[in-house]
Amino acid sequence: MSKNFISKLPYTGTTIFTVMSQLAQEHNAINLAQGFPDFGTPDELIGLVHKYMLKGFNQYAPMAGILPLREKISAMTKELYGYAPDPLTEITLTCGATEACYTAITSVVKPGDEVILFEPAFDCYTTAIELCGAKPVFIQMHYPHYTIDWMEVKKKINSKTKMIVLNSPHNPTGSVINHHDMHELQAILAGGNIFLLSDEVYEHIIFDKLTHESALKYKDILNRSFVISSLGKTFHCTGWRIGYCIAPPYLTEEFRKVHQHNTFSVHTPTQYAICEYLDQKDKYLTLSNFFQEKRDRFLKLMSDSRFELFPARGSYFQLASFKNISDESDIDFAARITKEFKVATIPVSSFFHDKRDEKIIRFCFAKKTDTLEKAAEILCKI
């Protein structure tokens, strides 16, 4: 490599998710680290993909996604949030939600702009912002409740602020925003030139009879928003890489300019299969109950451990403090229990730009009951 080579991302390495999953594999550990289920994708959905492959739907799909699927997404959105986005001009299928987030950021953020992020934050946002030559502006949320300080948000806003990134239900904390939060956000965005990226990939996974406060429920917000969701998360097929973005026509136009030269289109037979599968509304309407049972089971199984757990309100992640167990850094602690106790987790300092260590690790409870029981039995001995 040339000595004069300068990296565009000098401080970005391999993601912690890859690192911990590789460590789990090396030590034959139970993987509660990376956010994917260890139970199977529904056989019916797999069968539908096969059906459409055999029917010959194996060439490029339209750049924005097949229209029947966009129509189904519009109808689902109307039913859930009272707003029916135009399938032609406001919905775009993407290669997973990560591509959607990257495309949304790069379609409007320019060099010198600032983007507000709430930490701990999923790492894909910062990378996209930095590739645009823009500056991420970090606002901290704190264990155990991880709420947003809107007064601090107002103080951080200036003439350079181009976007706010909101993620609810939240990864990694499992917190969710409420009606008050949305009204605070609405007031901040009113009459300004700030866009919102609302990452709502866990929209169907929310607990304790709470309501998902989607940006799509608020007219004054959605008119300035990219709203991202994930069909892969919803239907337990994260490896299929299928998400979508809902945005007003003028933002969708810019979004598609980037998308068409990034991935162009999404796997065709998968789109047709999910389109048909969406006719069964219970498949997503019952998802909260399905995962709440797993959350509650995991909390009960961990009740005799020395970990301090605060129940997640959404997503399929559960944070735990190990301050009563060890003074190690969260990275060292996570690595040690993977090697010695054969359970892999994610150190939450990886979600902070300054690697802030609050002695917190993240568990993924989107696992089979047997997996959770085996993991908890081990964790209770630490």
Image (cartoon, grey):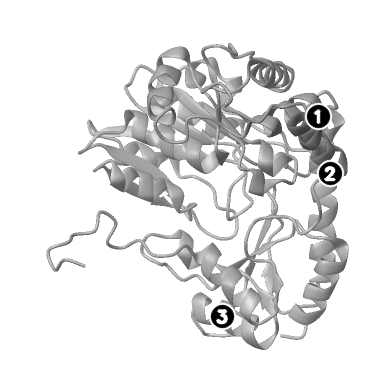
Q: Which mark is residue 42?
A: 2
| Residue 136 makes an appearance in the image | no
Which residue: 33% across, 28% down?
A: 108
Return the residue nearer the eye: 152 or 133.
Answer: 133
Q: Position of residue 381 (x, y in %)?
A: 77, 85
Classify mark 1: helix, strand or loop. Answer: helix
- For marks 1 and 3 on the same chain, the one whose residue lies earlier in the sequence: 1
Crowdedness of circle 2 by 10 Å Cα count: few (<14), some, many (20+)? few
User: As shown in the figure, which amino acid type bears the numbered disc 2?
Assistant: Pro
Above or below, 126 relative to 65: below
Q: Are marks 2 and 3 in contact (CB under 8 Å)?
A: no
Crowdedness of circle 3 by 10 Å Cα count: few (<14), some, many (20+)? many
Which residue: 29% across, 34% down?
A: 161
Return the residue nearer the eye: 196 or 249.
Answer: 249
Q: Are marks 1 and 3 in contact (CB under 8 Å)?
A: no
Crowdedness of circle 1 by 10 Å Cα count: few (<14), some, many (20+)? some
Classify mark 3: helix, strand or loop. Answer: helix
* Gap between marks 2 and 1 measured at Cα: 10 Å
Name the image quarter holding residue 317: bottom right
Q: Which residue is mark 1?
A: 277
User: As shown in the figure, which amino acid type bears the numbered disc 1?
Assistant: Tyr
Above or below, 151 relative to 29: above
In-image side of 163 versus 360 (left or right): left
Q: Which mark is residue 335?
A: 3
Q: Position of residue 218 (x, y in %)?
A: 56, 20
Above or below, 335 relative to 369: below
* Gap between marks 1 and 3 measured at Cα: 40 Å
User: As shown in the figure, which amino acid type bears the numbered disc 3?
Assistant: Ala
Q: Quadrant of the N terminus?
A: bottom left
